[in-house]
Amino acid sequence: MSNEYLASGPIRLKELLEAGVRTGLGADGAAGHQVDLFQIMRQAVYVQRLARLDPQASNAQDAFWLATRGGAEMLGIDAGQLSEGKLADMALVNLDQAHLSPCFDVVASLVYCASGRDVTTTIVNGQVIYENGESQCVSKQEVVAKAREHCTALITRLGVVKPAGLMPA
């Protein structure tokens, strides 16, 4: 999505993969204003199809692999799949929702229909860190308050005029 936002062009994914370049999907937020990995997977498929004018250029399985195993391999992390000896990193998604039903292909439903709001539980290295809409590690209110505080201080220090009504004083 960063490439779309910055108009820097689509990544030449097929060529990178054929050349053996470790490739993955991730969220940087700053350039794409998006951190929902489900939306990023969806966009990755659509961008590759559009760039090549080929509906077969990419699919849900490709995007899911890039966001899981591909990303882990790219970063040298022993994760990205559920198997003995790998890090237990996973997100559990509630598939029992109208927009994810009927679910004939779990990967396709996740890539094309799900969003981060559908995640019920997140487990990192075997530890539950998010469950039932709440972080198990930090206070959401404290994080948001601290982010506003730091953002306001940065805007003030830089002398940026903030748009009226967007951030509390």
Image (cartoon, rainbow, N blue to C red):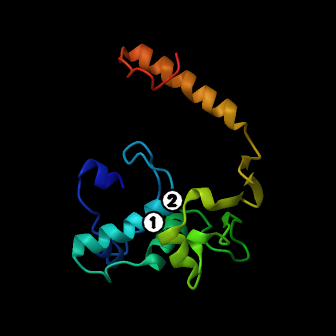
Q: CA gap, disc 2 to disc 1?
A: 6 Å
Q: Is residue 26 above or below residue 53?
A: above
Mark 1 neighbour density, 10 Å: few (under 14) some (14–19) many (20 or more): many
**Which residue is the site of mark 1?**
41
Please give the label number shown on residue 37: 2
Q: Which residue is depicted at the point 61% across and 32% down? A: 144
Q: Is 130 above or below relative to 86?
A: above
Find residue 38 and report its horizontal and vertical position in percent.
51, 63
Q: How many marks?
A: 2
Do labels 2 and 1 touch, CB within 8 Å? yes
Identify the residue at image location x=68%, y=37%.
Answer: 140
Q: Residue at x 41, y 45 (%)?
A: 33
- 62 w.r.t. 90: above or below: below
Q: Quadrant of residue 20?
A: bottom left
Q: In this orientation, which residue lies closer to the viewer: 21 or 109? A: 109
Q: Secondary structure at mark 2?
A: helix
Above or below for 97 versus 142: below
- Please indicate whether residue 127 sits to the left or right of residue 53 in the image: right
Instruction: Say which of 70 and 85 sits in front.
Output: 70
Disc 1, SS? helix
Left or right side of 82 for 104? left
Instruction: Inspect the image, locate mark 1, and give the three-letter code of the amino acid beneath it.
Output: Met
Quadrant (top left/top right/bottom left/bottom right) for the N terminus? bottom left
Q: Position of residue 69 (x, y in %)?
A: 54, 71
Find residue 128 and report its horizontal and vertical position in percent. Answer: 77, 56
The answer to which quarter of the image holds residue 107 is bottom right
Give how far across and how far down residue 141 sits, in percent. 68, 33
